[in-house]
Image: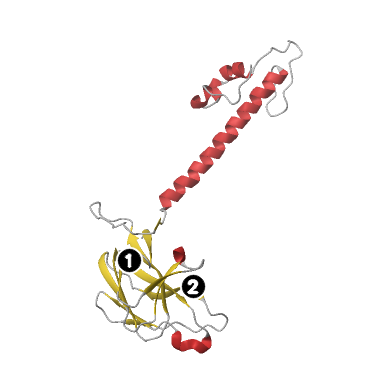
Amino acid sequence: MPSKTLIIDSAETSQIQYSAGWSFLPGNDNEYLQTVSYTTTKDAKFTFDFNGTSVKVYGSLSVRTQDIATLPNTSYVLDGGPPVLFHGNPSENDDHRYQQVFYSSPPLPYGSHSLVGTCVDQGSNVWIDYFVVEVPNDLPANTTIPELHVVHDKSTPSVAEILCGVLGGLLFLATTLSLYLWYRRCRMIETTGTLSAGATDGPFSPSPSMPAPNHDVLSCVESHKSSIPLWYVSSPPGSYV
């Protein structure tokens, strides 16, 4: 089912409620909008209320293998259900990993939902970057999707929209080619005077039995109106005296 993806930055405190113990710090180029929410305080929580059919929490890992105790030991409770734990995986090659999925919900019926995230252990580094919410495109007409504080909104194009774009591009190319060939024909008639008898695709040459008339492009337009698009007759390419 086509859906709309909403990305909400963790610094959107008007939409995300944080308990004591959280800090809001500048991030780096690898973090969404270069912001991050951070805590090492046990039982520090956030509450994210949303309307949608799924939710994901993305964060950053900043540890080395030997510092496994500082991995983000967290739990996530959706709509009062059972907690889902996330502790992260140690890294052997580097000490920073970004845009890691900390939590991913199962498919949900569209409606209001609430996600509560908690830092389980004192001293574990919890870096929350952003939230992703999916919303179906085919909602009833009277359904209101709250757009306030939504940082990013990206809709998935439908098959019809893609086909319309492709057909429109092909039509534009075909029209451009037709106009170019028509313009070239007019220029060659202007230069040579008339078409050689029986000539179709070859070069143009004046008839030996009559002098070449001094045609210009405008007279060519009048004589070829039936073979060009009507919308183009009033505005031939170029301007000649």
Corner quadrant of residue 209? top right
Using the image, tell me which numbered label, if any, was put on residue 98: 2
Expressed as whole percent of the image width and height from the top left, the position of residue 127 reads: 42, 75
Residue 217 occupies quadrant: top right
- Pick whichever, 112 or 72, lies toward us: 72
Tell me residue 86's x, y (percent): 39, 82
Q: Residue at x 60, y 18 (%)?
A: 218
The amino acid type of the residue labelled 2 equals Tyr
Q: Which residue is mark 1?
A: 13
Q: How many marks?
A: 2
Task: Please tell me whether residue 167 is drawn above or below residue 88 in the rendered image.
Answer: above
Q: Residue at x 68, y 26 (%)?
A: 200
* Quadrant occupied by the N terminus: bottom left
Q: Nearer the viewer, residue 136 or 197?
A: 136
Q: Secondary structure at mark 1?
A: loop
The quarter of the image holding the C terminus is top right
State the image coordinates of residue 96 (x, y, percent, origin top left).
Answer: 52, 77
State which tag comes first along the sequence, 2 or 1. 1
